[in-house]
Amino acid sequence: MSDTATAAPPKAKAEIRAKPPMTPRKLLRKTGFYAMVVVVAVYLVFPFYWAVNSSLKSEGQLAMTPATFIPRSPTDGSISFFTRNYEDVFADTQFQRAIINSIIVAVTVTLLALAIGSFAAFALGKLRFPGKTVALYTILSMTMFPQIAILTGLYAIIRSVGLTPRPSMILTYLIFSLPFTVWVLTSFFRTLPGDLLQAAQVDGATSFQAFRLILLPLTAPALVTTGLLAFIGAWNEYLFALTFTTINPDDRTIPVAIALFTGQQTMQDPFGQIMAAAVLVTIPLLVLVLIFQRRIIGGLAGAVKG
């Protein structure tokens, strides 16, 4: 029998490829899914939108009742954007110093966490030594302690040693960022084929050379994920920064500077300026997440798989 005789007519092919009609149950399920996505998106985006909206309002606009979703003039109700809040924030010297302090602390914590954590994760994920499982779960248990539980002890140690606020914050933030970094990177190292390390050793490479030249570049998604989370944690931390900088206000970081923002005038409630400062310090984090979002997803997927 020829191919022409056995081939289905075009109309029959179209009927075969046509999707079955969507049942009411499937339609309801699909509608509910997209409705849930919209609710979650609004729930996550609305606080940032309201911060932007409030940052573009004057004190008179903020006092309007009911509150407006777009900055409007209190007199005629026309759309009116008040940019003076951002000008006051940029003109505040304490806020400028706080940005520099936060950059120094957050970048240092991130680099140290990745450098130390990658070595530890390589050893826990690829090398064999006694007590490896105990060490791994001991590191994980360090993340279970609440920050407030060790605040008093850390502050007493830092005062007795005589450390300045910046090194104090860096060492303290490493206590909380290192365990997570080591755990995620260890899970990622475990997913890498063991043949890579063996092949490198057969070719004469040491364990350190195999780690630096072969395995470490493959862990780029996990490094980006853990590094970004460590950076965000150090950038947004408030409790220890407030405690360690009580004696030296010049070393305050951004969260403390925003919380203690007094405004440009006496007896002023600088809510609009606080919102403007919050928007300014949030934008860099959003940009970093958008730039590295694919690597972040790959790093988290590898950690979960491991």
Image (cartoon, helix red, strand yellow):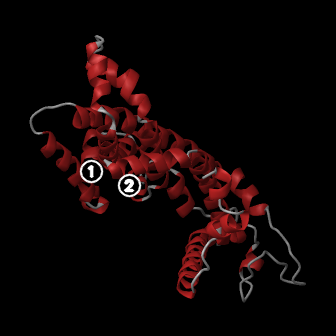
Is residue 139 toward the left or the right of residue 116 in the image? Answer: left
As helix, strand or loop, the secondary structure at mark 2 comes to helix
In the rendered picture of this protein, how many numbered marks are placed on residues?
2
Indicate the amino acid at tag 1.
Answer: Leu
Q: Residues within 10 Å of mark 1 (few under 14, many from 20)?
A: some
Which comes before the other along the chain, label 2 or label 1? 1
Q: Position of residue 189 (x, y in %)?
A: 32, 37
Residue at position x 55%, y 73% in the image: 40
Residue identifier under label 1: 154
Looking at the image, is 270 positioned above or below residue 29? above
Evaluate whether residue 51 shows in this view. Answer: no
Indicate the amino acid at tag 2.
Answer: Phe
Residue at position x 83%, y 82% in the image: 74
Q: Residues within 10 Å of mark 2 (few under 14, many from 20)?
A: many
Viewer-proximal residue among 235 and 100:
235
Asked if the residues shown at circle 2 and circle 1 are in contact, with their CB atoms under 8 angstroms apart, the answer is yes
Residue at position x 33%, y 18% in the image: 209
Quadrant hosting residue 193:
top left
Residue at position x 55%, y 56% in the image: 257
Q: Which mark is residue 253?
A: none
Residue identifier under label 2: 240
Evaluate whether residue 144 shows in this view. Answer: yes
CA gap between label 2 and label 1 equals 9 Å
Looking at the image, is 59 positioned above or below residue 96? below
Outermost residue to the left = 130
Outermost residue to the front = 1
